[in-house]
Structure formats: structure tokens, C-alpha cells
Image: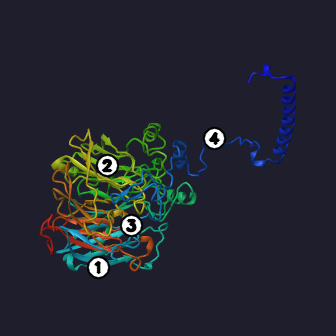
Amino acid sequence: MNHSHRTPRQLCKTAAAAMLFAALGASAFAQDKATQPAAAQAAPVDPNFVPGTPDIKDPWLAKWLAATPDRTPKELKPGIDYGMNPKTGEFVWPKATPEVHKGQKFPGMLDHWDKTTFTKNVKVLAFYENVASPFHVWNNIIDFDGKRYLYLHDRDYLRIMDVTDPANAKVVFSKGAVWGPKGPSERWNAATVTDYLGGATIAWSKKLNKPVMVASYEIGRYGLMNEKMKEPEKVAAQRNYSSLKGFKVYEMNGPLPSDWKLIATRTTDYQHPDAPIGQQQGSGSLDSPEYYGGKYMILAAAPNDSYALSEYPNYLYSPGYQVWDMSDPADPKFLSQVTVPGQVVDDKDSIFAYLQNPRAGNRASWMGARIPMFLPKPLEQGGKIGFGAMGGLGLWSFDMSDPANPKILDNVNTPPSFAGTEYDNADVSQYERTGYVFTSGYPMNRDCYEPYKDIFVVNAKNPARMKVETTLPRPKPPEGAPYTDFCQRGGNFGPKRSNAIGQPGGWRQNIVPYSFYNAGVQMFDVSNPADPKIAGYFVPPLADTTQLPGYTLGKGVLAMYTEYDRNIMWAFTEHGAYALSSPLLGEPLMGAPKKPFPAR
């Protein structure tokens, strides 16, 4: 406004209004200042505080937090942000979710645990109820004196079954809890356990001329901690863990633990090989060792606490790989540590690589290995290539020509898929024939409250130039199912793992069976890996609260083990074990195998 055109009377009115406004404003400002809370006053300066320093006691967690932004994904609304598409009957998956421990119901889910069964090219030979755990099962096979024994085990239990006749198996040894509708028969404290059998591998030792078992001892992944940033006492307990961080080697003079003889104990904290329990650093040996009874063994392990660049909320480490000389199983010798960029919090180049990963800061992704390196051919038999599935760090290929000096060849990764774990498993069963590797993570949130975990088909014909070529088909419910998408069945849906380490008879070409949680067993025809198809399946009924407590339900088939020498598949659910056969594998052998396992 041009004030030069105002009249003297208008100017007087404007001046009076300005004086009144100034008086009122000054009064209001004085009242506001008098009533301001103390918190709004300037805070006193702490001369010792450095801005950006996390309020975390553990120094390794503090370094990780100081290096990464907070990109925690927001909680999503079912039926709005994700859920059923009424036009197609298919599930619309979340794009990113936080890690959660409870079910996340969405509109359109079944209101009960489904009891229907569907099969294609699979036959049930027998079902054995409550022989394992509703949470996890490691498995091994060994033959003694014309009988075949199946080991089912985790930290809180060990069951040994005589499965010489898979249709009439018997439990011959039982230690630890048996589960029922009221929970476990024995209470177990994950924080104090010291005597247990974790992931294990059985192989024939030429040196000892008998079978040996190498058993992993690692920090427990469940029941110890929920949120590492909020539980300093539990973090400290894991740093000073009450059990071995490493592995043990046993002579096996018979099938039962009373027949075994401990011949070696080692910590994966190779920089402090004599450190006592409670002072050993790192993670211990994860899952089942990659070992075939010869000179070399490969473990998944974080050797010390600096391997801390990991987002998963209840795990402290980003494990790499270790190679051990097992020429004498009674005297294992450390050879080498394999570390990839983006694992070590004390290394600026590693942090630089980590921050380029779009998962950095999401507080949900598992980073690093969960299983040892996967070998298409044992090193002693001329194998020179290894593949490593390393969580959110992707799939890695390694030159293992000199196991004392492994070399990184290449890395391939895909867009983030969190929560859940990514790149957990790599199936190399078809690699020698085709040059392809199958790799995936698996769902850890229930009720499809995370992005789907695809099984990626990786062209690794040149392991120094890997490429994701396609994915294995996503299972769909068969015609007649009371749901149009497996997500509606509730619980977990997605791949877990395929072939285990140390299965009798080696691998079968063209067919790969996967455990698929609530979609049961899915058998893939990979005769042409670039054009894979589902050739068979077994979708069993889900357990309910008449069989197990509600908090254990919804897993379906959580693990598999295949006897390729007898064409028998073992599928483990939350409430028992199925013995299965399939014409895709061949006629099942219902007695002792022609040659004992492990191969002599």
C-alpha cells in the first residue's frame, strides 16, 4: 500500500492502532514469558557431552549407531497398506516392515488354523508327532551296524530315531523337552544353557577311520534378547557368554551320546585361542559346519566383537567365514578368516561400503552369514569355488583355490526385502551341471507382514560376473483350497531352505525340494534353471491349540532333510516329522541302504 495517499485522519488512526497493538503485544509477551515451562529455557551445557554420541553402554553398538542413520520402517496398517486384492484374490505384500514378534492379522485371513492337506507327486509314508521342537530342528543321518539313525536337535533337546524302516521309525534316545498344548515338558533357560548340540555335521574321517561329528556352539539367537539398543545387561551377557563360542569335535563309536568321545574344543575367537569361556569374543560357529571328513572345514563366524555392522535387533554380529585345517580332527588349526566389505565397525572402508547399502539404518535386516560357505564340490575333491549367502550383504563368490588365502570374486544383491532375513541359503546342487545357484532368505515375521522372500536364480557360470536371471515360481494354493493365497492361511509363508549339509547320496539333478513353511514342501523342476517350474508339493495340516500353545503356531514345514540314497524326504513341522516319498526322486527304499552313510 502506498502510504503517501493516506489522509491525516487515516494516519492518526493507524498510529493509534499500532500503539494499542504494541501495548497489548508487550503485555502478552510478558505473560507468556512468565508462564513458560522451565524445560523451554536454555539447557545447561554438559562440558563432557559430544553431540551425536549414542546413549549406549556397549562400545561396539555405540559405534554402529554413531555411523548409521535411523531408518526404522514405520508400522503398516493391514487392509490399507497391504492385504488382499479383492479383484485378483492375491495378497498385496508390504514394501518394508519392522521386525515384530507377534502375528499381524489382516482382513481376509482364515479365522482358524487350516486342517486341509494337498499333495502332488508326494506320498506320506508316516507321521511322528512331537519328536522335535516347534521352533527349529537341525538334522543329521548316520548308519551303524546296519541301522540308520536320524538325529533331531537344537539347543534344548536331542532326539535320536531309528529310521531303518522310515514307515515304522522309533525314538531310541530322548533328552530335553517334549512339547504339547501346555508347552514344553521341561523348562529351559536360554541364558544359562551350556551343554547342548547345535548345528552339527557328521563325516567319515580317513585319519581316524571312523565317523566324527563337528558341533557348532554359538550365541543363541532366540530367548536371550529382543532389542539390543534397550537391553544393556543382556548385551553384556552375550559379550561375556556363559558357553563356548566355537565348535567341538567328537569321535563317534556308536549312535548314542554315550558312545561319543570329545577329542577337540576350539573357539572361533582365533586371536585369543586360549581365552576361557566368558572372555571369548565374537559369535561362535553358526549352523552346521561345511565339512566332508578331509582336510578343510568352513565355518560361519564373527571372530571378534568389531564385526558389529548388523541391523537385526536381537543379534550383535555380522559373521564372515573361517577355514580350518582338519587333517587331524583331534587338533584343528585355524587357517583363514573371510571378511567382506561392510562388516567391521572399526574399519572406515567397511563403514563406507556399509552405508552405501540401502539397508543401513533400517534396524531390521540381518547382515552377514547365517550358514557356512556353500561348496559345489569339496575342496579336497578339486573344488575351487565357494558361495556365501550373507544376509543383506547379498550373495558372494570366492576363489578357494588356496584355502589359506581365499579371494573375493564377485557380489550380487537385490532390492531390500525386510523384515525377515535375506540371502540365508544358497543351493549349489545344480551348479556343476548348469552354472546356476539358487539363493533366498526366509520370512521371520508372521502373517506375511514383510516383503515376500523370492528364491533368486543366479547365473554364476562365470563366478566373477554373477547375475540374477529369474526367480523360482511363487507357490499358489491348489484348486479346492479354502483360500486363494497362502498368506490367508496365517503364520509364515515363504522359502526356508533346500538341501542340508551332509545328505546321504549327494544331490539329485533336475529336482530341488524346499521347505516352504505354511506352503509345506515345494518341489521345483530345475532341469532348465532359467525356466523353473513347480513339479510337486505336500501341504500338510497346520497344528492348532489342541496340540501346541498359540505362540508356537503357524510355521508349517520349517525344515527338510533328504535321503537321496533311499529317496526319502523328511519334512519337519511345528508339531512333528513326516516321512515322504516322491516319484520325482524315484522309488523309496524301505530298509537299510546299500552303502552306509557317511561314505567310508
**CA–CA distance in space, label 3 to label 1:** 31 Å
Mark 4–mark 2 Cα distance, whole angstroms, equals 38 Å
Q: Nearer the viewer, residue 84 or 327?
A: 84
Q: Residue at x 33, y 58 (%)?
A: 88
Instruction: Residue 254: tell me if it is visible.
Output: no
Residue 189, visible in the rendered structure = yes
Label 4: how many Cα within 10 Å (few below 14, some 14–19, many 20+): few
Rendered image quadrant of residue 114: bottom left
x and y percentages locating residue 109 in the rendered image: 40, 66
The percent position of residue 313, horizontal first and vertical second, equals 49, 55
Label 3 vs 4, first from the N-terminus? 4
Q: Earlier in the sequence, mark 4 or mark 2?
A: 4
Query: Label 3: which residue?
Result: 490
Tags 4 and 2 touching, CB below 8 Å: no
Query: Marks 3 and 4, how far apart in space?
Result: 45 Å
The mark nearer the N terminus, 2 or 3, is 2
Q: Tell us which disc is closer to us: 1 or 4.
A: 4
Query: What's the amino acid at mark 3?
Result: Gly
Pointer 1 residue: 171
- In the shown orientation, is residue 190 left or right of residue 580? right
Residue at (46% x, 73% y) in the render: 188
> Which residue is at the front of the view, 396 or 447?
447
Q: What's the distance in space between the residues labelled 1 and 2, CA to CA?
A: 35 Å
Q: Which residue is mark 4?
A: 51
Q: Amino acid at mark 2?
A: Gly
Q: Disc 3 vs disc 1: which is toward the camera?
A: 3
Q: Position of residue 420 (x, y in %)?
A: 41, 56
Looking at the rendered image, the disc whose residue lies closer to the viewer, 2 or 3, is: 3
Whether residue 465 sits left or right of residue 340 in the image: it is left
Q: Which residue is mark 2?
A: 388
Q: Nearer the viewer, residue 137 or 457?
A: 457
